Amino acid sequence: MCAAMLSLQAIILGLSIPVMIAVEDVSAPLASLIGGGLAVLCLVVAGLLRHPWAYWVGHGIQVATILTGFLVPIMFFIGLMFAALWLGAFFLGRKIAADKARWAAAEE
């Protein structure tokens, strides 16, 4: 579920590039670096979520997405929305993993 959230977030971050440029007058290289860099990072981390450290990077991506609100104010809201979705997926995934482990132990 976390990988799905990061994949959707990558799309939104990619779409934020033209908004940064056209609406908020952010320079094209800076907008591309921030929006594109975070989008690529989302996709890379989505593929690396089998490693526990990747979840910490995912948490950092959520903070960075919220911070893009200083360039595009609506990104404060969008970043908080994705952070909530990320945390929901993160904690639900941990609960499912714990339930699976408990069920496996009960079968033995």
Image: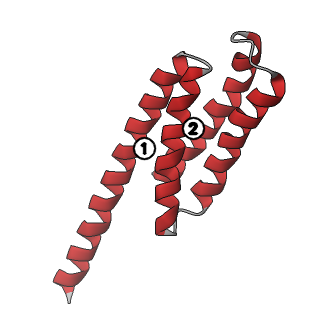
Is 30 rendered above or below residue 25? below
List x then y, in percent, for residue 83: 43, 38
- Would residue 58 be found to the left or right of residue 105 on screen? right
Indicate the quadrant containing the C terminus: top left, top right, bottom left or bottom right. Answer: bottom left
- Would residue 44 be found to the left or right of residue 3 on screen? right
- Would residue 94 be found to the left or right of residue 105 on screen? right
Give, as a three-letter code, the residue at label 2.
Gln
Q: Label 2: how many residues lie within 10 Å, few (<14), some (14-19) or many (20+)?
A: many
> Which residue carries the number 1 mark?
86
> Which residue carries the number 2 mark?
9
Question: How many marks on residues?
Answer: 2
Give, as a three-letter code, the residue at label 1.
Trp
- Would residue 104 be found to the left or right of residue 52 on screen? left
For numbered disc 1, what is the local secondary structure? helix
**Depth check, front residue: 41 or 97:** 41
Q: Quadrant of residue 14?
A: top right
Q: Residue at left 54%, top 44%?
A: 61
